[in-house]
């Protein structure tokens, strides 16, 4: 893993000591351009933390209502715009009255039961390593005495207290990192709607710098960036200031939401949102999936028990994200009176209990070595350790670990306090077999630890079936580029999608056992208007140049097509690549698999 750049300097040492941090003076000067800013390495604490708590809390927590499947924190926008068939507007007028203005919710945001120490205790018990609070959402209401927010912040209205500061103190007292979400834009701020540049200079920039200087956040989750290009937001200028002159440049981590179209192109880490567990794809980069325990980020009284993820689902979500090298930022939506709903506390504590036993298989780990998840579960790794997260207990207690090249020196279950060794058979199915006979699985996920005679290595080539056919699934692909990604693993094994950049391409490593000609077929999807993109399939000297044929109807409607015939005259390892030469519509295609079948 990469380590953050260290910085030294007497002035920074004094400032940091006063704030309780480490020395922070920069040794390198960052310029306000993406080439310079993107050369920064993500601070190591973030890539090792793996689990954080997101908190959406504000004036929208008073009505705390939106249609199922939507975000309750967007209440004001849905009210004003009449979206979702006017459901929020109908609710608002029925419950509060037609003339009740959204700003009248501020005095009702009492937070009278808010106890930051109790919150911090729940977060500590959850096993989370960092906390991210919405300092300001798109409605503009601030949870601290922000500049240029007269009467529209938590110190002057509602609870009459500095919620950002109170929570930061409690969270840090538990040894956790404190971060803040900040929305760059505000839906209905008059200056934003009339003069965006003036809004940035006189409102946004003073606010976000004040947030940094007051609270020294370890993380900044920027949002609302999609409305303007990064030049308008002056994002490079802000980040250069943050990295060069901020109070804790060696610690602070930022996301990738700094301008229209900039996600997965900038920032210390990339973000996904309700995007599953596979990550952003492409070249490895620190990443984080954010989502709620229910669907809404802000508390939504319209959600019921069936809308909330179960304890097992939450634990397994964390496992799958860690197994793909990412972090989970799991959201809670407190109530307007300052309580964390009990069902959310229950899920957090359940995660914490599981981590209490199995935390070493999550914290500080990297993605497992298997490109395609084994049938029994997922894997993470750390040094010479390989952790097998068993989600499906093997039949007869025999756990097959395919294609593992390293020798296992010891194996045990993390839930076994005595660390009794498990019998391991080498050479089974080009890998090993772990004997779990007589051992009991844990209810949510069981972890088997393997100590290896070196770093985990697997033979991740795709091997042919009994008839010599080679099926190259999307999950087995190596992805080259920034946009293309593996997605929707829960639907027929997933697909390669977001192929909007023709420079992105995919490749597969496989072993062939039959020399000669192979018939090539492709399973793909594309809607009307996106057919016709040209691409090339290459294997060694073999080459098929073709186009995406007729549309399938949508990005989720797949059909199989024959691409032609290709020769492979040697037995052994090969690489197949799919490289676009251009696109005609929104994206090249969604690709589910390619099959090479020996020609008859």
Image (cartoon, rainbow, N blue to C red):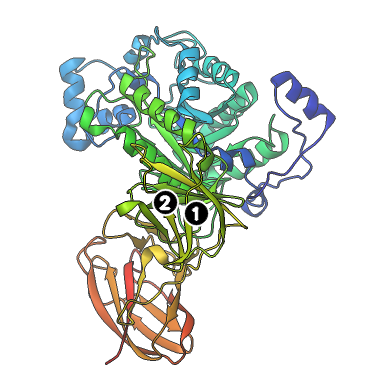
Q: How many marks?
A: 2
Residue at horizontal 38 percent and vertical 32 percent from the top: 187
- In this view, the residue in front, 9 or 436, is 436
Q: CA distance from mark 2 to mark 1?
A: 7 Å
* Residue 287 spot, x, y in % from top left: 50, 47
Q: Earlier in the sequence, mark 2 or mark 1?
A: 1
Task: Determine whether 330 is above or below 576 in the image.
Answer: above
Q: Which residue is mark 2?
A: 378
- In this view, the residue in front, 164 or 193, is 164
Q: Count neighbours of disc 2 (C-alpha within 10 A) and say few if under 14, some if 14 to 19, many if 20 or more.
A: many
Q: Which residue is mark 1?
A: 368
Residue at horizontal 31 percent and vertical 17 percent from the top: 62
Give the left or right position of residue 390, taking residue 493 as reference.
Answer: right
- In this view, the residue in front, 409 or 474, is 409
Visible in this render: residue 139? no
Task: Determine whether 70 is above or below 402 in the image.
Answer: above
Q: Are marks 2 and 1 in contact (CB under 8 Å)?
A: yes
* Residue 89 spot, x, y in % from top left: 20, 26
Determine the residue located farthest toward the right in the rendered image: 10
- In this view, the residue in front, 227 or 38, is 38
Q: Count neighbours of disc 1 (C-alpha within 10 A) and say few if under 14, some if 14 to 19, many if 20 or more.
A: many
* Residue 392 spot, x, y in % from top left: 32, 49
Residue 582 picture quarter: bottom left
As helix, strand or loop, the secondary structure at mark 1 comes to: loop
Residue at horizontal 30 percent and vertical 90 percent from the top: 599
């Amino acid at each position: 893993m990469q380590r953050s750049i260290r910085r030294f300097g007497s002035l920074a040492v004094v400032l940091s000591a006063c704030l309780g941090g480490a020395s922070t003076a920069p040794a390198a000067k960052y310029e306000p351009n993406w080439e310079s800013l993107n050369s920064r390495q993500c601070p190591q604490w973030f890539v090792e933390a793996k689990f954080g708590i997101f908190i959406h809390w504000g004036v929208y927590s008073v009505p705390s209502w939106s249609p199922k499947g939507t975000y309750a924190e967007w209440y004001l926008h849905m009210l004003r715009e009449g979206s979702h068939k006017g459901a929020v507007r109908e609710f608002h007028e029925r419950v509060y009255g037609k003339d009740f203005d959204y700003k009248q919710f501020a005095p009702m945001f009492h937070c009278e039961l808010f106890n930051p120490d109790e919150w911090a205790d729940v977060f500590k018990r959850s096993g989370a390593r960092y906390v991210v609070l919405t300092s300001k959402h798109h409605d503009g209401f601030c949870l601290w005495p922000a500049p240029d927010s007269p009467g529209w912040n938590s110190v002057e209205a509602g609870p009459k207290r500095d919620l950002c500061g109170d929570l930061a103190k409690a969270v840090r007292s538990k040894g956790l990192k404190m971060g803040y979400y900040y929305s760059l834009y505000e839906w209905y701020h008059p200056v934003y709607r009339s003069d965006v540049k003036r809004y940035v200079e006189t409102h946004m920039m003073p606010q976000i710098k004040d947030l940094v200087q007051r609270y020294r956040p370890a993380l900044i989750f920027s949002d609302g960036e999609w409305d303007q290009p990064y030049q308008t937001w002056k994002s490079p200028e802000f980040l250069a200031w943050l990295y060069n002159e901020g109070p804790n440049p060696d610690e602070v981590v930022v996301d990738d939401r700094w301008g229209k179209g900039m996600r997965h192109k900038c920032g210390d880490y990339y973000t996904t949102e309700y995007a599953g567990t596979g990550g952003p794809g492409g070249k490895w980069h620190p990443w984080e999936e954010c989502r709620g325990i229910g669907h809404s980020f802000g508390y939504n009284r319209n959600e019921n028990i069936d809308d909330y993820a179960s304890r097992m689902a939450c634990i397994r979500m964390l496992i799958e994200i860690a197994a793909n090298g990412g972090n989970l930022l799991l959201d809670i939506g407190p109530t307007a009176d300052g309580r964390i709903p009990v069902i959310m506390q229950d899920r957090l504590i359940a995660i914490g209990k599981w981590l209490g036993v199995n935390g070493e298989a999550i914290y500080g780990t990297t993605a497992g070595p298997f490109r395609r998840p084994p049938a029994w579960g997922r894997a993470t790794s750390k040094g010479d350790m390989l952790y097998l997260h068993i989600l499906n207990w093997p039949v007869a207690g025999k756990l097959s670990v395919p294609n593992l090249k390293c020798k296992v020196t010891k194996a045990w279950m993390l839930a076994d306090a005595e660390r009794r060794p498990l019998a391991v058979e080498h050479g089974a199915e080009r890998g090993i077999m772990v004997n779990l006979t007589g051992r009991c699985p844990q209810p949510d996920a069981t972890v088997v630890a393997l100590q290896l005679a070196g770093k985990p290595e697997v033979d991740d080539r795709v091997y042919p079936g009994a008839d010599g056919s080679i099926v190259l699934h999307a999950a087995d692909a190596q992805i080259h580029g920034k946009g293309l990604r593996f997605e929707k693993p829960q639907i027929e094994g997933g697909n390669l999608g977001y192929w909007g950049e023709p420079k992105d391409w995919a490749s597969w490593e496989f072993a062939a056992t039959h020399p000669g000609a192979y018939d090539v077929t492709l399973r793909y999807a594309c809607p009307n208007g996106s057919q016709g993109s040209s691409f090339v399939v290459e294997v060694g000297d073999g080459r098929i140049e073709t186009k995406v044929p007729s549309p399938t109807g949508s990005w989720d409607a797949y059909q199989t097509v024959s691409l032609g015939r290709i020769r492979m005259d040697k037995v052994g390892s090969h690489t197949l690549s799919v490289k676009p030469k251009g696109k005609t519509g929104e994206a090249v295609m969604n690709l589910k698999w390619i099959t090479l079948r020996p020609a008859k």
